[in-house]
Structures are given as C-alpha cells and as structure tokens.
Image (spheres, helix red, strand yellow):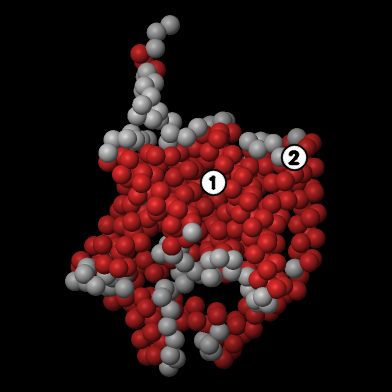
C-alpha cells in the first residue's frame, strides 16, 4: 500500500512537472542527492548492458522507477507548508506505531506467529519501518513541533514493543544507535526540567518493556549463540547465521569474478543457488546476499556499490550541514529524519536488504524527499500564485 501510494504520487508529480503545472524545485542539496540516486540507477542499468542482459533484466529494472521519481516528488511536495508537513509526518508516525502494536497483538497472540511481520511479510522489513516511526516520534517529542509529547512517547513505546516482538536483533541495534543519535541532536533540549522528566519516564517504561519481553530477547540471543557455536565448532552452515556467512562467502567470490560492473541485477539468485550447491552441498536459494553493499557489488560491481554508498553519504552530509548551522526546529527535524533513515538502513542493510524491496525503497524516498525539503528546501508557490520576489529586489 505504501509503495502504491508513493509511486502513484511520484507518477502524478512527474506529469504535473512535465505539464508545467508544478515548478521544478532546484535546491542544491536536492540536486546533489538526485545526482547520487541517478548514478546508482545508471550503474544498475550499465551492469545489465555490460552483461548483455538488458532485455531479460527489464522486469528487475522496473523498481528503479521509485528512485527516479525523487526530484519530481520533491518538487511537488515543495508547495506544502513546512510546519504542516512536519506535523503530518509526526502524527503519521504516531499512528504507524500504534498500528504496529495492534498488528503485533493480533499476529503474536491471536494467530500464534513466532515473529510478527505486520503487513510487510518479513519481520526485518516490518521492524525497519516501525523503527523509523519510533525515532520520528522521539524526534517530534524532543523538537517541540508537536505539543502532545506524552502521546508521542506512548506511541514510541508502542512501536518499541512491536520491534521487540518482531525478533529482529539487527533492528534492536539500529533502534539503539538511532535513539542515541536523536538524543545527541536534541541534547540542549534535554536540559529543561520537563524534558528530563519525560526522559526518565520513558526510560522507566522502556525498562518495563524490556522486562516484559525478556523471554523473547533471551530466546533470540540463545539462537544467535547456538548458531555461532554450530558454525565455529562444527562448520554447520544450516542455521540463520550459517546461511548468511555462506552467502557472504559466495558473494565475495562472485564479486572477484567481475569486480567492476558486476553480473547484472538478475544474477544474485542463480549465483547463490549454485554457490550453495558447489561449496556447501546444500540446495538453498535466496534472492539477495543479506548484505546490501555486497549485493550491489555482485550485481553492479564497484561502480554500483560506490554509487549506492554515495546516496547515504550525500544525505548524511546534507543533514550534518543543517545540524551544524541551523537552529530552526523545522530544519533540524528534517535533518534528524535524514540521520534516522541513514542509520537505520545502513545498520539493517549489513545483514539484510538495503534497497531493492518495494516498501523499503518507497520509505527511503519518502524520508529523503521530506527530510531534505524540511531541512534545506525552499517552498514554492503553485503555478497560479505569483513567485515571491528575490531578496535582492526588495527595497527598503
């Protein structure tokens, strides 16, 4: 549903810009990010051309459209008032956290699912999106944009429970790192008595949640210990950790074969299946290497991996510049959104999907579009409104 809404909106935004019913917003941070995103798309297409598979890869190249919509969605969203957009983002994240808790209760206690996965069909993907929502609620409460801090804290705690029941250990780590980053960004706000009280209450409730989910944490930790022991002591790759280690070894071997432009976007599945048979005598198949940058290295070589890394590097640089120079709460909130999405995606992408999943791609673009606009974008009038005069033309 998220993918449908964003891509549909992106298509409509592209038509509006093409028909000159919306102005094309050319902000320097947006342009830099667009260059990085389009370079990644170009690297993926180039890999298919080099491997003479552009026709057979056509279906796998279609999801790149989500990335190509970035500058057009940005331009269409630029007519919105920044305070209104920021509040919409915060309130939507709050609703997402409460919705995630509802789905957790249904799936875990009613349907008896061992790991909740929301509507994503994948616990890690579900936990990734909820982690972003939790961090936005946390940033919204600390920024002062939304007055109802208590409700935001409750929403953040509801989302935290959902992430806990997803059993996604890497998202537990991502939530910890992103949470520390949000606190550091808003450290000056924590000096007030109300903020300290809010933080203490949140910490106490967080400890209660950890105690409530102690059994889940213990079970997941035991699984990891057992997988590690089986891999190290017995060379057993028939575990979740063993599968990942095997895929990383297969991926590195495949990268060495074609280091510059890769094997093409369709190659991962076949390489993994053949690698498991040849190297481990196992009949296993996966669609990606459970490491976002390794997948990019195999599919598009060094060119593709560097282009993918540049998206997050440029986004982080844009955010750092705003956080260093601006005191405006809206701009700092937008920059915080970028920091949150960069940390969450890079952490989760080390052992899972970084890009290439429909909802993850759409949510990444949503955060980059809205975060960049709030942090450093200029608000554009609609085509039937006069363009505001430049500062240099204003007299007196």
Mark 2 / mark 1, whichever is N-terminal: 2
Secondary element at image label 2: helix
In the depicted structure, whether residue 192 falls above or below residue 229: above
Q: Tell me which residue sits at (28%, 76%) in the image.
A: 257
Q: Position of residue 334 (x, y in %)?
A: 52, 40
Mark 2 vs mark 1, CA separation in Å: 20 Å
Q: Residues within 10 Å of mark 2 (few under 14, many from 20)?
A: some
Query: For this rendering, which residue is in front, 217 or 191?
Result: 217
Q: Is residue 329 above or below residue 270?
A: above
Residue 33 visible (yes or no) = no
Which residue occupies 56% across, 61% down?
128
Q: Position of residue 149 (x, y in %)?
A: 71, 41
Residue tagged 2: 195
Residue 330 picture quarter: top right
Q: Quadrant of residue 336?
A: top right
What residue is pinned by disc 1? 337
Left or right of residue 263: residue 276 = right
What mark, if any, has residue 215 been given in the picture? Answer: none
Give the structural element (helix, strand or loop) at label 1: helix
Give the residue drawn at x 37%, y 78%.
Answer: 269
Q: How many marks?
A: 2
Could you tell me residue 279's position as x and y percent?
A: 40, 89
Residue 312 on image: x %, y %? 43, 52
- State whether residue 242 appears in this view: yes
Residue at coordinates 30% horizontally, 53% vertically from top-left? Answer: 39
């Amino acid at each position: 549903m998220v993918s449908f809404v964003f891509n549909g909106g992106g298509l409509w935004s592209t038509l509006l810009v093409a028909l000159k019913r919306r102005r094309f917003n050319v902000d320097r941070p947006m342009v830099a990010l667009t260059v990085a995103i389009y370079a990644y798309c170009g690297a993926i297409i180039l890999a298919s051309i080099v491997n003479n598979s552009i026709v057979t890869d056509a279906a796998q190249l279609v999801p790149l459209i989500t990335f190509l919509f970035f500058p057009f969605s940005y331009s269409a969203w630029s007519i919105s008032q920044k305070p209104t957009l920021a509040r919409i983002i915060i309130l939507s994240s709050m609703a997402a956290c409460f919705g995630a808790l509802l789905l957790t209760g249904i799936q875990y206690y009613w349907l008896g699912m061992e790991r909740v996965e929301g509507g994503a069909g994948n616990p890690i993907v579900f936990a990734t999106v909820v982690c972003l929502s939790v961090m936005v609620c946390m940033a919204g409460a600390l920024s002062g944009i939304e007055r109802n801090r208590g409700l935001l804290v409750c929403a953040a705690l509801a989302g935290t429970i959902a992430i806990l029941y997803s059993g996604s250990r890497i998202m537990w780590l991502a939530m910890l790192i992103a949470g520390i980053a949000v606190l550091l960004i808003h450290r000056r706000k924590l000096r007030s008595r109300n903020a300290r009280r809010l933080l203490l209450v949140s910490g106490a409730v967080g400890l209660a949640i950890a105690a409530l989910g102690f059994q889940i944490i213990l079970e997941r930790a035991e699984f990891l210990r057992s997988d590690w022991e089986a891999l190290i002591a017995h060379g057993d790759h028939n575990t979740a950790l063993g599968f990942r280690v095997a895929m990383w070894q297969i991926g590195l071997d495949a990268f060495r074969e074609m280091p510059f432009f890769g094997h093409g976007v369709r190659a991962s599945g076949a390489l993994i299946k053949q690698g498991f048979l040849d190297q481990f005598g196992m009949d296993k198949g996966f669609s990606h290497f459970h490491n976002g940058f390794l997948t990019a290295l195999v599919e598009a070589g060094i060119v593709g991996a560097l282009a993918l890394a540049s998206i997050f590097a440029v986004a982080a640089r844009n955010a750092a510049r705003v956080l260093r120079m601006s005191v405006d709460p809206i701009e700092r909130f937008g920059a915080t959104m970028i920091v949150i999405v960069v940390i969450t995606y890079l952490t989760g992408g080390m052992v899972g999907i970084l890009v290439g999943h429909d909802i993850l791609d759409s949510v990444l673009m949503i955060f980059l579009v809205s975060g960049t606009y709030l942090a450093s974008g200029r608000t554009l009038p609609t085509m039937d409104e006069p363009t505001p005069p430049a500062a240099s033309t204003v007299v007196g």
